[in-house]
Image (cartoon, rainbow, N blue to C red):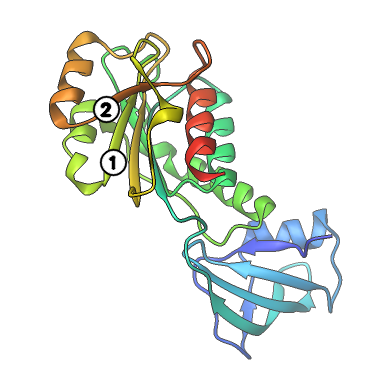
Amino acid sequence: MAQPRFHVEQLAVTGSKQVLPRAAAHHARDVLRLTEGAEVILFDGAGHVATGHLHELNRHDVVVQINTCMHQPPDGRIALTLAVAWPKGDRQEFLVEKCTELGVAAIWPMVCRRSVVLPAERQMEKWRNWAIRAAEQAQRAWLPEITPPQTFDNVISRRAEFSYALLADPHATRIMDDVPIEAAQNILALVGPEGGFTEEELAAGEAAGLEQVRLRTPLLRVETAACAIAARWLV
């Protein structure tokens, strides 16, 4: 069984003690019911990982004795950024959770012409908490960067930051499986809303240098398409 894993904003050094954040302390003490001496893993979401054991538990604090610290490189050879037209309701949590588990480098909530949900910056803490829980479960050292919401136009204006960029369109001629990725180090992939990208957006994306590709499957929900793209490049 994997050792319990907890996220902290900043790791203490080897040989020192670290007080767990309130949510992590509650999970360790009241949910997992760990006891003193239990071995745990701490991570900061930026590749720093520490092993340790529970030194003290009380009703207020859970304290970990840090035994070793290390830095792990990013999980995959490709850094994938997903710019996604935000889905409805609890499908948002599914998207963040599964893309974190798959090792996506960044998630950009995106506002398109046909967007049915307008993501708000005030929700970013909630999105980050979903990612933290997913990373703990999947034993990942890195959290995806989740940015404030961006417009479609702003997203495509950042094409030059990536070695390859695609726009998922079910009517595209080229199939995503046929796209070679050997030379791609960082990829930008855009997933549109339920109604798809407009003709104007498709034209703007093409002009900006994004290739239009499609999955082999028929129409997918937004969060399913995002996960399928992540699995194509990362698994």
Q: Position of residue 28 (x, y in %)?
A: 76, 62
Q: Which mark is residue 211?
A: 2
For the residue pair 67 and 204, the one nearer the viewer reads as 204
| Horizontal side of residue 207 vs 214, given as left or right | left
Q: Is residue 61 visible?
A: no
Which residue is at 20% across, 33% downward? 156
Badge 1 element: strand
Quadrant for the C terminus, please: top right
| Horizontal side of residue 224 vs 210, given as left or right | right
Q: Which mark is residue 217?
A: none
Q: Earlier in the sequence, mark 2 or mark 1?
A: 1
Quadrant for the N terminus, please: bottom right
Residue under circle 1? 164
Which residue is at 24% across, 34% downward? 155
| Horizontal side of residue 143 vs 169, given as left or right | right
Residue 35's quadrant in the figure?
Answer: bottom right
Q: Tell me, yes or no, whether the two marked residues, 2 and 1, touch with CB atoms within 8 Å.
A: yes
| Horizontal side of residue 136 vs 116, given as left or right | right
For the residue pair 125 and 72, the one nearer the viewer reads as 72
Which residue is at 17% across, 12% downward? 200
